[in-house]
């Protein structure tokens, strides 16, 4: 079974060291800018920041993922943004400094706060979209609180929210340009369990077949691979933990660099509530991302993990 590709920005030294290298013929693009969204400087979203890595001796700095301030010195993001691919533990890389930056563009941040530590959710033995079992959540600890930013509230996601529309945001790649600018969009919660490709294509095998042979950018076209992707159990959401959202007509999907970004509701800083974390997306040759996104939701267990991790902040 092919590896799931994480949502990281690939480029320069970081692309070589992070472990977020392109896996061979990945079936699911696990990564995520907000495709079909709009650039935003909405102060309600000030809590959303970008994660960057700096190697001073080489005058090198690169952006990787998105995160959300959930306490004065605590940021919520995706676990693969911290651990990378199996065997790659790049928090910290010796001689690297790791930061969360705040503002509307990671290249011109209004604030830059150093990361001093992190904790990650343990993987699930039940499996999921990620090859290591999912539970793609991490909590970062900052060495100081950013100034003037109201932390987001944590919300409990349950099955009754399926069919409702959420907001998504991040600094990832868009169809219009490279990563680095904060974008936002809308995404309906579509499914909390089931097989990835049948869900994406509403069990329409003909539509899946046409996409696979003409527009699936990560395919190495063969009848055997196509059958494998559609086979129940090959790529499956972990029930109750992983959510398919977005990609419906007029909606958005997260993409490269949006991993760790929030699935949220609220129109002001005081009502900004996070219900999940972006970790996967599916696209095509014509559209890098756009068919649907994967989100690790804050169900009972994951909400408790994040709350406990935040409470234990140094």
Image (cartoon, grey):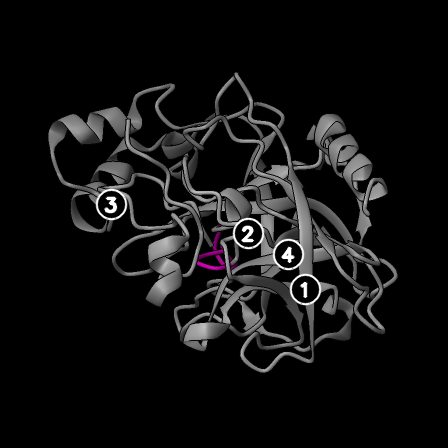
Depicted 159 relative to depicted 9: above or below: above
Please name which of the two marks, 4 or 1, marks the residue nearer to the observer.
1
Q: Which residue is mark 2?
A: 92
Give percent across and percent down for residue 56: 50, 73
Seen at 67% across and 58% down, the residue is 115
**Between marks 4 and 2, how big is the CA–CA gap?**
17 Å
Q: Who comes first in sequence, dot 3 or dot 4?
A: 4
Q: Is residue 189 left or right of residue 250?
A: right
Q: Quadrant of residue 241?
A: top right
- Disc assigned to residue 114: 1
Depicted 178 relative to depicted 186: above or below: below
For the N terminus, give its image quadrant: top left
**Between marks 3 and 2, how big is the CA–CA gap?**
40 Å
- Disc assigned to residue 67: 4
Q: What span is colored magenta in the figure?
A: 248-257
Q: Who comes first in sequence, dot 4 or dot 2?
A: 4
Seen at 68% across and 49% down, the residue is 117
Please name which of the two marks, 3 or 1, marks the residue nearer to the observer.
1
């Amino acid at each position: 079974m092919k590896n799931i590709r994480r949502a990281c920005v690939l480029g320069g030294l970081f692309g070589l060291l992070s472990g977020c290298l392109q896996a061979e013929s990945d079936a699911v693009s696990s990564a995520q800018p907000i495709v079909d969204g709009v650039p935003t400087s909405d102060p309600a979203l000030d809590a959303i920041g970008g994660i960057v890595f700096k190697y001073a001796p080489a005058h090198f700095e690169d952006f990787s993922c998105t995160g959300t301030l959930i306490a004065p010195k605590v940021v919520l993001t995706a676990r693969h943004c911290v651990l990378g691919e199996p065997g790659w533990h790049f928090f910290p890389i010796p001689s690297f400094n790791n930061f969360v930056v705040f503002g509307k563009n990671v290249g011109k941040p209004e604030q830059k706060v150093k990361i001093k530590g992190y904790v990650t959710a343990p993987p699930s033995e039940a499996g999921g979209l990620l090859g290591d079992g999912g539970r793609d959540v991490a909590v970062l600890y900052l060495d100081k609180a950013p100034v003037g930013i109201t932390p987001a509230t944590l919300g409990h996601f349950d099955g009754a929210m399926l069919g409702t529309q959420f907001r998504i945001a991040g600094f990832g790649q868009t169809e219009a340009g490279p990563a680095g600018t904060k974008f936002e969009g809308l995404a309906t919660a579509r499914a909390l369990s089931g097989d990835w490709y049948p869900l994406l294509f509403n069990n329409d095998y003909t539509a899946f077949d046409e996409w696979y042979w003409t527009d699936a950018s990560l395919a190495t076209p063969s009848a055997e691979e196509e059958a494998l992707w559609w086979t129940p159990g090959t790529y499956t959401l972990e029930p109750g933990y992983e959510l398919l959202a977005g990609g419906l007509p007029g909606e958005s999907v997260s993409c490269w660099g949006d991993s760790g970004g929030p699935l949220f509701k609220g129109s002001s800083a005081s009502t900004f509530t996070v219900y999940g974390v972006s970790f996967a997306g599916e696209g095509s040759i014509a559209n890098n991302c756009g068919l649907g996104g994967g989100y690790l939701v804050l169900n009972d267990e994951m909400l408790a993990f994040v709350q406990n991790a935040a409470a234990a902040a140094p």
